[in-house]
Image (cartoon, rainbow, N blue to C red):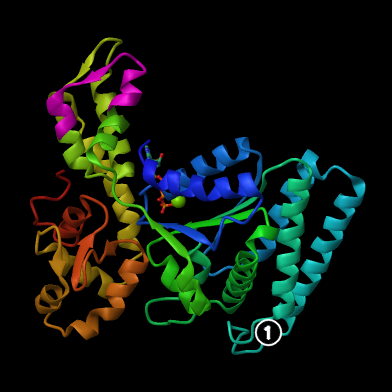
Amino acid sequence: MGRQAERAKLRERLARVIAYGEMMGPLTVVTGPRGLGKTSLLRDVADQAASDGFVVCWTVGLKRKPFLDELLGQVARATARTDSVSAPASRRHLEELAVQLTLGLDTVEATATPSGPGPAALDRRSVGQVERFLGESARLIRAGGGAGLLVMIDELHAPLEPASDRDSGQDQEAVNDAAVLLNAVQDMAAEKERFPLGVIGAGLPQTKTLLTRVATFAERTREIALPKLDGPTSRALLTEPAGLFGVVWSGGALNWAIRQGDGYPQSLQIIGEATWDAAKPERGGEITLAHAKAAEQAVWNELESMFQARWQAATNSEKQFLKAMASHRKDTVPRAAVAQTLGLATTDLSMARQSLIAKGVIEAPRYGELRFTIPGFDRFVSAQGDAANSEVGRP
Ligand SMILES: Nc1ncnc2c1ncn2[C@@H]1O[C@H](COP(=O)(O)OP(=O)(O)OP(=O)(O)O)[C@@H](O)[C@H]1O
Ligand SMILES: [Mg+2]
């Protein structure tokens, strides 16, 4: 629901693959804080692409783990499954390429120096092999009547995450994988008419920064930063599922729910479901403000369990940072004000700040300003470690 502009952008780029058999361009990444709808958007685009004749492979990046073997394995399996590569000779050719590729990549790992291969020591041979494999797969799919190959990589930031806020080191094998893939995609985009291929990633807001650390040209990555849902989409997200059961939302209930959800799909969904459960409406019934209010505690409980996970993942200095930020009780808080509350210099806080941004807990809407990404998290933070606070457990 909603996301028309972002979906249109992605579909427009894929339309080039369909129409001319040429690559959709450089890597495109969809970015945004947790729960904003990145995976949903990618799934949607993937489904549409599949019905447009693409062979779609889907990989999910894991924290500080290499991902290229898995990705290429997915491509090999997905390609082999399609009718378009049914000729035994084509199939054999691809299998051979896949085997060479696995051997090639293993060599890279085996020769990794203690300081790690890093982007500087990039193995051009692996890049060439990955290019050939992706390119041949895409061309075989096309030759067999398909549109091309679409590779989706969700959680693309995860393999490239630093070890902790105190250690800026990335996992060298994961970095190597990203470097090989980025270089291969970059080379192929330079000769786009040869490759009926698209590569789309999704990840937290820092994804592009992390990619740029791996290869400077990753600055050319096309980023689609997802905004919060707008009012009409938030409204539709609540009313359309109800409408399927002939149930309507009263104006008051709707306004309240939209305000509480604040354009955040995950929260809106929680609010919608909890309110529905409180109302237990029959066909033709109405969800009222009283129902919404009755659901308030249930909503808060659900949000709290989501918040709890984030809170647990924060270090002590990050927790202090969050508490200082929440104590201002404002939508956006100047960075300097947080430092002042803690009696520290802003530079002393840069590590905690960057790490919290990297985890998708806070974001910097403008330079020097910070805000929480999910509505309600500030309230949750204020309630932590202060049992006397009367707001504990209250929505
Ligand atoms: N446009 C949308 N319309 C309706 N519901 C949506 C929309 N986008 C996301 N949602 C719902 O919001 C929730 C979070 O969405 P999703 O998992 O896609 O977010 P995400 O950005 O991938 O989050 P994460 O960073 O945690 O992976 C899901 O339950 C999904 O169904
Ligand atoms: Mg996701």
Q: How many numbered marks, from 0 up?
A: 1
Q: Considering the image in quadrants, where does the N terminus appear?
A: top left
Rendered residue at 89%/54% (across/down): 92
Q: Quick one: SS at disc 1?
A: loop
Q: Is residue 179 above or below residue 205?
A: below
Q: Nearer the viewer, residue 264 or 125?
A: 125
Q: Is residue 120 above or below residue 63?
A: below
Q: Nearer the viewer, residue 144 or 126?
A: 144
* Quadrant in the rendering for residue 308: bottom left
Q: How far from the left and from the top, in percent, is residue 329?
A: 9, 59
Residue 161 visible at all? no
Looking at this view, name the residue that lies furthest to the right. 89
In the rendered image, which residue does mark 1 sit on? 112
Q: How far from the left and from the top, in percent, is residue 79?
A: 75, 48
Judge from the rendering whether residue 2 lies leftward or rightward of residue 346; answer left or right: right
Rendered residue at 71%/42% (across/down): 146
Mark 1: few/some/many CA within 10 Å (<14, 14-19, 20+): some
Q: Is residue 27 magenta?
A: no
Judge from the rendering whether residue 170 lies leftward or rightward of residue 5; answer left or right: right
Rendered residue at 38%/41% (across/down): 4
Q: Is residue 241 above or below residue 8?
A: above
- Ligand 1 within 8 Å of disc 1? The answer is no
Name the kind of residue labelled 1 in the image.
Ala
Q: How far from the left and from the top, in percent, is residue 180?
A: 64, 73
Q: Nearer the viewer, residue 32 or 193?
A: 193
Magenta segment, which residues?
239-255
Judge from the rendering whether residue 271 lies leftward or rightward of residue 168; answer left or right: left
Q: How far from the left and from the top, in percent, is residue 202?
A: 47, 56
